[in-house]
Image (cartoon, helix red, strand yellow):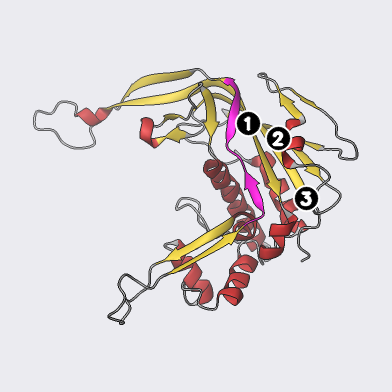
Amino acid sequence: MAVLTKKIDFAIIMSVKNANPNGDPLNGNRPRTDYEGYGEVTDVCLKRKIRDRLVERYELLKKEKKENGQAVLIQSDDRKCDDATSVRDRVEKMLSSANLKNQKEDVDKVCKEWIDVRAFGQLFAFKSDKKKKDEDSDGDTGTSVPIRGPVTIQSAFSTEPVSLSSTQITKSVNAEDTKDGKRSSDTMGMKHRVDKGTYVTFGSMNPQLAERTGFSDEDAIVIKEVLPRLFENDASSARPEGSMEVLKVIWWEHNCKSGQYSSAKVHHSLNVHTDGTYELTLLPKLVPEEIPGF
């Protein structure tokens, strides 16, 4: 496959209603907000959802025996489609070692095997199985190999400060027996949600970095296909089915590797309103594709 031939910018407009789009574990799992009250969904959270959709796509391809090069390295435990117990285990099953001693050759192999490594890059940091025998050195002799990916995505922020609601909940049963038979303290809890909000995130695909990982035009199309389905099969207690929706994906494909405009100028050409509607300032010779959400 030929590497990415053109620079690509994209934006995702999302709506949230009575859901917790991204809880903060350091703040009682309340929805993330900045200091001005704007809602936030981190880039890590968005990449996780993209990877989950890629795993689902891979499973379908596997049934059709078309999965070559479309596997996903970083799989969550409840979404994984293989028997690997960890990232290291998954790497070792493919390379027979996680140390990446022959870096150029091994990096090429992992990029060829896993689409998320080609797209987002990866830091392979593993401890050694045994310590150095050299008395003059201490610590372990593990590996740390960074791979810089061509696809970047920003955290999503709401178009206006969001209103948060918190609800006290009570479980009907005790998780553990109590001495007096009464309800234990763990039956009480809290749930938090964003009442309503429109969130926007931006991303870009860099052809120069794509040359290092082998990220191709075909891979870009795969990412393009999963973005409108970001919340498919993503329902949970915090995000009930239908509470989160991709409204629109805006896709700018430049006519060269360096791009006709900077990503900042392209992203600024999109103005999203609080109700999810938007305005596009058309840039000369750069016509965006507007893709409806799934």
Mark-to-mark CA distance, 2 and 3:
23 Å
Dot 1: element: strand
**Which of the marked residues, 2 or 3, is nearer the chain's N terminus?**
3
> What's the amino acid at mark 3?
Lys
Q: Residues within 10 Å of mark 2 (few under 14, many from 20)?
A: some
Asked if residue 47 shows in the view, the reply is yes
At which x and y percent is residue 187?
26, 28
Which residue sits at x=45%, y=63%? 125
Q: Residue furthest right?
A: 285
> What's the amino acid at mark 1?
Glu
Direction from residue 100 to residue 213 in the image, left or right: right
Q: Which residue is mark 1?
A: 245
Q: Which residue is mark 2?
A: 293
Image quadrant assignment for residue 13:
top right
User: Residue 7 bears which disc, if any?
Assistant: 3
**Which of the marked residues, 1 or 2, is nearer the chain's N terminus?**
1
- Do the residues under discs 1 and 2 have CB atoms within 8 angstroms? yes
Q: Residue furthest left?
A: 179
Dominant SS in magenta: strand
Mark-to-mark CA distance, 1 and 2:
7 Å
Which residue sits at x=67%, y=54%? 150
Which residue sits at x=66%, y=41%? 229
Which residue sits at x=81%, y=48%? 259
At which x and y percent is residue 23?
45, 33
At which x and y percent is residue 191?
39, 26
Dot 3: element: loop
Magenta segment includes 77: no
First to last magenta residue range: 149-160
> What's the amino acid at mark 2?
Gly
